[in-house]
Amino acid sequence: MSKPTPISGFPEWLPAQRMIEQNIVERIRATFELYGFAPLETRAVEPLDQLLRKGETSKEVYVLRRLQEEPGAQSADSLGLHFDLTVPFARFVLENSGKLQFPFRRYQIQKVWRGERPQEGRYREFLQADIDVVDRDDLPFHYDTEMPLVIGDAFASLPIPPATILVNNRKVCEGFYRGLGLDDPDQVLRTVDKLDKIGPEKVAALLVETAGATDAQARACLELASISTADASFVDAVRALGVDNPLLDEGLEELVRVVEAGVEHAPGLIRAELKIARGLDYYTGTVYETQLQGYERFGSICSGGRYENLATAGNERFPGVGISIGVSRMLGLLFGQNALGVSRSVPTCVVVALPAEELRPACDRIARSLRSRGISTEVAPSAAKFGKQIRFAERRGIPYVWFPGADGAADTIKDIRSGDQVEADASTWQPTAGDLTPVVSGS
Amino acid sequence: MSKPTPISGFPEWLPAQRMIEQNIVERIRATFELYGFAPLETRAVEPLDQLLRKGETSKEVYVLRRLQEEPGAQSADSLGLHFDLTVPFARFVLENSGKLQFPFRRYQIQKVWRGERPQEGRYREFLQADIDVVDRDDLPFHYDTEMPLVIGDAFASLPIPPATILVNNRKVCEGFYRGLGLDDPDQVLRTVDKLDKIGPEKVAALLVETAGATDAQARACLELASISTADASFVDAVRALGVDNPLLDEGLEELVRVVEAGVEHAPGLIRAELKIARGLDYYTGTVYETQLQGYERFGSICSGGRYENLATAGNERFPGVGISIGVSRMLGLLFGQNALGVSRSVPTCVVVALPAEELRPACDRIARSLRSRGISTEVAPSAAKFGKQIRFAERRGIPYVWFPGADGAADTIKDIRSGDQVEADASTWQPTAGDLTPVVSGS
């Protein structure tokens, strides 16, 4: 085999980075479980026709074929890799609705795949961590207010820069556009969504050109999109634009509830940001995006919203609200800035030094005794000189080396950072809490 | 959407089952980490030519194609889904050898995919939990003795029937066959490997027919394969067959070390079982299989062995030894016998009852207080009658319902299993340890 090289868009972390990822996923999971979300994993594949229901993502799907299958045969039951966790979740709910308790709260932390062109922070394979709540027929609105609080708690548990969750409500935009007299609100929304990419002037021109807006209407749309407040004062700012519409009223009332719940729970966590739209067309009310302070230019690392109609079969309907953390995306950005570290590259806390190969069984017994009390331990790979055995630990960041006592002398343990060496008994010795397991920290 | 149906070979667990799977994976992981194995995840895909290096698995590979790609175009850089975790691990070691510390101990818990025909306990997508140790140039033999001890500890931490790890050594077989005068030991091994499927008589006939054996040689091979001991006495049994060969001696010595380490660590865990061969052709010494008591007929749920030559590039060579737990396979068998249960189907420990919708903020504060002390809590979805709110908890197996006190009265908490209801303060109340998180148990 010649030396293999990485595949663009398929990131792989080295073990120390994987330890950080795992630690971060565990903390996220712990928060999700504190809120009563149950774990779920769905298969990696969905029938291709399900994945293509929303035409816009068709270009991103990886299709599967068994090697022995006739190539090019795209049969009715072709399978593709899922490109998000929402479509598989909706399918799972429909398939198992008789076995689930509603409202159903689940979290799902899995890889997803998209065949798009890789670029900074955009991968072809990446890890997502989703929460959603679905109910049969109707889902109370208070779940929309809960989503960002869960995410706020999850992010607060991580050694990362502070997060700001930006919220908006599709009803505010649609109601406002309709109140203005624009009758293709979807087209307006799609155009306003380009604001960060092409700037206000081009958006205004496009609104006139493609959405039938007058200059004054286009200006009003831009003014709405410029509203951004950390409290409910956005309502006054919208009212000052002089547009009146029942859907707008409904949207404002909902958005106030989300923002006020955020203000009570964690001041500074949430902003009403009225330009947020989210590209995917299934959101029907609240929408969320999330920025990390200092990483705003990279866009959202956690997004979602309310969808009234994602899962329907016959006369069964399951509205939901959900939000998804882009774990790989977030870690890729932070790793790129060396903003995350771990105290060692292995779980090992103690290396038992091996004075001679024939003493391995005795050293194994010491290791077993330490492990039985939850202390991760390895025995040195060979009876090399002690200097080499200490370097084995040093190179991995392992804090302690254990020396079996010779000729009836007591065992000793050496903290190889300080050089301190003390007598120790394998059945009672305990490392400091900070040394027991690797510590992940920001920098 | 019409009601979706399952896809054969792609198992999905319901949330309660997924909770069991997650709990079991965590315990396995904890044991791996106690032994100092570092976590690793590799991408799901490998270049197709890497996956097809061993011709025999070609039929099982899923090939990927982007939907917009020309169908049928199987280009040089085609990607396939990995069918095990060993091939990706070998590739990862070669690719990153300059960044890793050797000997390198890693665990890897991921899904793998095989396009083979699904049947009981055989899936197209399944979860594997692997450990391997690799070193540069040479890997000391003592790692062969360690693998089954790690697995033994991992299985002992699970609520499953006792496991027996069956071990053999390819050198014992090859040396024995050569000592007998048979000069195509691979062919003999492949034939003897069919023992459980076709029985001794057909194996003997095949040995004569395809491996150039005399009746006496065939009988000797079957006698070797019938040896099975829980201690080192297999050596005498082999010696009694009167065959002499240096490779046989080496293999017996190695096998004795593995069995004796097992006897010291956990009596009854390991058996020398001289018919074990393992189909894959890259093993060169020790081989492992694992049976769960009561599930022997389903075959091995944890297998592996020593491979001297899996990863090589130029003049770099990385021998290794590893073992892999078939997590989905094991769970599928145990779920099929209703042999695993969990005390509730959600992480939630407490449901806060909602007396009236306008009291939701107060109920949210109670929930927040409980969560801040690690108690998983949900607030009731709506201000339904208390009987309905209690049933909400009951149907999910949630043990406690919290009732906010009205008009200055103290809050109370009700254990809905016993009906006991007592005064409680959200800032201090604590569930019993057994109720804090769901408990997974065998049955």
Image (cartoon, coloured by chain):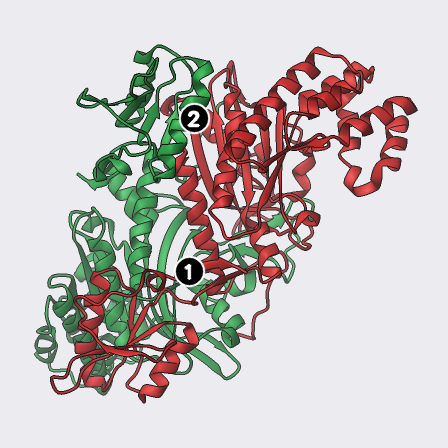
Chain colours: A red, B green
Residue at x-position 34% and y-position 45%: B22
Dot 2 falls on which chain? B
Element type where label 2 sits in the image: helix
Residue B257 image position (x, y, % from top left): 18, 76
* Residue at position x 35%, y 33% in the image: B370
Tag of residue A439: 1
* Tag in front: 1 or 2: 2
Query: In the rendering, at what x and y percent does residue A277 appear?
Result: 70, 31
- Residue B22 to residue B221: above or below: above
Q: Quadrant of residue B236?
A: bottom left
**Residue A79, visible in the rendered structure:** no
**Residue A83 horizontal/vertical position (percent):** 58, 42
Under circle 1, the secondary element is loop
Amino acid type for the residue under numbered disc 1: Val
Q: Is residue B14 above or below residue B189?
A: above
Horizontal placement of A116 versus A266: left or right?
right
Q: Is residue A53 visible?
A: yes
Q: Which residue is mark 2?
A: B364
In this rendering, position of residue A365 left or right of residue B285: left
